[in-house]
Amino acid sequence: MSTEPERPVLHSHTTRLSYADTDPAGILYYAAWFPKMEALQSEFLYLQGLRQDTLVERFGWWTVSRATTCEYLAAARLFDEVRIDLRLGRIGASSFRFAFRMTRLDDDVPVARAENTVVTVSPAQEPVRIPADLRAHLERWAGRGAA
């Protein structure tokens, strides 16, 4: 996981774990967080006016996920309420990371943390440098630009 300094929370969602997420022993199914992270990331970008389904026609680029990691830190039991927080991680030349933290609400214990590396690509899916319009958003989300 990244050693970047922690940035402000950009977006959050609270969910109650179900049988699709974990078993009664508190063993989280390894892939359970990935759809929840994708939904949070997609919703955040949508709320910023960056709809994945219109990026190519509007801007001439789009984004794809390149790599995702997740570390499981504590048990998450059936019916626990968990808050998933989204932050911006590292910003590179043609990619950036979203960082996620999943926290059990009843005792404020982090149960998992994850990162998703997103690459900007051309319509032909070739990596391209992060376009200026997207970089401006990233800098603002990182707290380094005007709001």
Image (cartoon, rainbow, N blue to C red):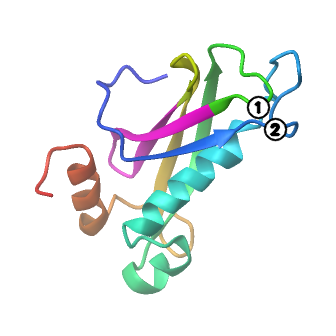
Count of numbered labels shown in the rendering:
2
Question: 20 or 30: nearer the eye?
Answer: 20
In reply to whether residue 20 is colored magenta, the answer given is no
Which numbered disc, 2 or 1, marks the residue that appears first in the sequence? 2
> In the image, what residue occupies the spot 44% across and 62% down?
45
In the image, is residue 19 above or below residue 127?
A: above
The percent coordinates of residue 64 (x first, y second) are 56, 58
What is the magenta segment's predominant secondary structure?
A: strand
Looking at the image, can residue 134 be seen? yes
The percent coordinates of residue 129 (x first, y second) are 34, 58
Q: Is residue 58 left or right of residue 118?
A: left
> In the image, what residue occupies the spot 49% across and 22% down?
1
Q: Amino acid at mark 2?
A: Ser
> In the image, what residue occupies the spot 53% across and 71% down?
52
Outermost residue on the front side: it is 106
> In the image, what residue occupies the spot 46% across and 68% down?
46
Where does label 1 land, which residue?
Answer: 79
The stretch of residues the image draws in magenta is 82-101
In the image, is residue 40 above or below residue 77?
A: below
Where does label 2 land, which residue?
Answer: 18
The percent coordinates of residue 74 (x first, y second) are 65, 13
Q: Are marks 2 and 1 in contact (CB under 8 Å)?
A: yes
Which quarter of the picture shows residue 50? bottom left
For residue 1, the mark is none
Q: Is residue 20 left or right of residue 113?
A: right
The percent coordinates of residue 111 (x first, y second) are 61, 20
Question: 127 or 69: nearer the eye?
Answer: 69
- SS under mark 1: loop
**Badge 1 density bin: few <14, some 14–19, many ≥20, Cα 10 Å:** some
In reply to whether residue 94 is colored magenta, the answer given is yes
In the image, is residue 142 above or below residue 27?
A: below
The C terminus appears in which quarter of the rendering?
bottom left
